[in-house]
Amino acid sequence: MESIFKVGEFEVVSEAAVSCTASMTENGAGRTVTEFQLQSDRISNMGTAVEIRYSFPIMDICGRWHPNCRADRAMKADWEAPVASMTAVSAPVVCFFNSESRNRHTIAASELCQEVDMNAGVHEEDGRMAVKIRFVLSPQKLSAGYSFRLWESQEDVPYWDTLDQVRQWWEEAMPPVMEVPDAAREPVYSFWYSWHQDINASIVEEEAERAAKMGFDTIIVDDGWQTGDNNRGYAFCGDWAPEPGKFPDFPEHIRRVHAMGIKYMLWFSVPFVGKNTGCWNRFSDKLLCYDERQQAGVLDLRYPEVREYLLAVYLKAVREWDLDGLKLDFIDEFYIREGTPVWKEGMDFRDIQEALDVFMTSVRETLRKEKENLLIEFRQRYIGPNMRRYGNMFRVSDCPCSPVTNRVGCADLRLLCGHSAVHSDMLMWNRGESPEAAAIQVLSCLFGVPQISVRLAELEEGITEMLRFWLDFMRQHRALLQTTVIHAKEPENLYPEVSVENETEEILVHYSAGRVIRPAAQKEITYFVNAQHAQEQILILDPERAVSVTVKNCRGEVTETMEWNGGESLVRLSMPACGLCELRWE
């Protein structure tokens, strides 16, 4: 029997008889939190769905942002599919902004573990935004009383400030996020695009030595260390033992890499167990699903035996092999599908998201006892608040040779990740690429941590010089680039202008042509980056302040210097491709 409650502007609809009360708190800045108290002891063992509905007028809104929107910032109709979030997928927030990059209406939910479906779309009949937020509650939660909080802001501030407020609101009600060691913010060399599965101890050690000389601090050895098969797929994932023909003495191999001053991270596809592994028979009846194309199944964490096995694998890797970090892949595969068993003997959880939380918490706590500064990397789209409790490196989803996707992904992650380290997808380019064109890719992740995946021995001198220059710049300005609130303008246009600033310095980047350089007021230094091809730039300067100007190309070579002593406020500047302009104010 469906029940419907009217609570102020909200309509609360449930599939079963559920009692509901609500209370609202607000501040004068246009932010409110509405708390819904839901309770029932007369529902089925399957749980019940609850939907909260309301609407607001569409006023001065040009686009929509959510953590997994990627290149799609378009408004949606109310009949289109909702945006889903859960522990291992995205995060429950939708932000509506105007053409000046200012918040107009942001909605966030307190439920960070279970699936939440948020549908905020245009109701064509009246020009209002129809909001529907749906979630399913277990009998245990409803019988004990369940609190669901809805955070909203109509505050007229830059949308990035609003999203940072959402991040802080979540953090206030959850356990602390994972600490971020300095190593998580240093450039990384990855073996994936450069070598794929064609790796062995000699290749890794030779490339690690080159990486150390170029200033890299960490390498990530990806898929291929555990198998001699080079056909991709996951049929050989699950045993997690080094392939003896490639790595005959894994601990000694890692010791040799450590002796170069390089930290060692290793890839694991967490959920997959392949048919061609020794543990297939042990776990083939403990799966959420099976994929014939991949020749692998997705493990069901609701079985304690599965959780204990995976934890033992990672503990061995850290304790016996002395790994510095784990790249834990495909966490977003842990969800219930059609055909997934609801309950079977041997399970100790009915809910896969609860089991995932218990498992990932044990991974973090157990491994950090072995190595306090452990690095754990996750990837879009498993980047929500709970995932920040379990990991400290968050990487852009795969986008080989796509600087636009990398730029957008880095900015999107930065908007909600607080002080967690945001990493680019691995950068790669054709061996014949010019230094300037390769630099466009490097600068796409200027506000994150670059991961490079090209064969270092094959780099021509100009590209090596470019990499050294920009990696050094990222190191020198690491705190400003990575830990301050990112000002990613025009999300509807995929961030053509991005900046960060503190009290004395500003770093401003243009990713598209025809924009005017407007340095922030009263800074001591402005670094302007032309992350595109060579072009003439117009600076608007304070006529009352003198400034010295130094222009460098993508290799760090000085191409122009000038002293500007005030007067005219418009100055023409010739900027090289992917070059840097330093403005030092007197």
Image: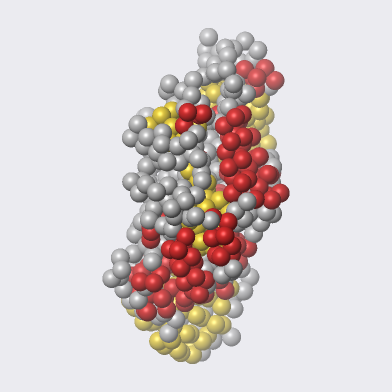
The residue located at (40%, 87%) in the rendering is: 559
Quadrant hosting residue 169: top right
Q: Is residue 112 visible?
A: no
Q: Nearer the viewer, residue 404 or 201?
A: 201
Left or right: where does residue 106 sit relative to residue 83? right
Q: How many marks?
A: 0
Query: Looking at this view, is 95 or 360 the one in front?
Result: 360
Q: Is residue 229 left or right of residue 363?
A: left
Q: Position of residue 168 (x, y in %)?
A: 64, 48
Residue occupying the point 53% across, 26% down: 135
Q: Residue furthest left?
A: 432
| Residue toward you, 552 or 572 | 552
User: Vertical placement of 9 versus 366: above or below?
Assistant: above
Asked if residue 203 shows in the view, the reply is yes
**Residue at (58%, 27%) from the top-left corner?**
303
Looking at the image, is 351 positioned above or below residue 248? above
Query: Where's residue 562, x and y in %?
Result: 46, 89
Q: Quadrant of the C terminus?
A: bottom right
| Rendered image coloring scheme | secondary structure
Front residue (pair 149, 136): 136
| Image: 2 above or below 570 | above
Q: Residue at x 54, y 18 (%)?
A: 343
Position of residue 521 measured from the top left corner of the image (x, y, whole percent): 56, 73
Residue 140: give x, y in percent of width and height: 65, 19
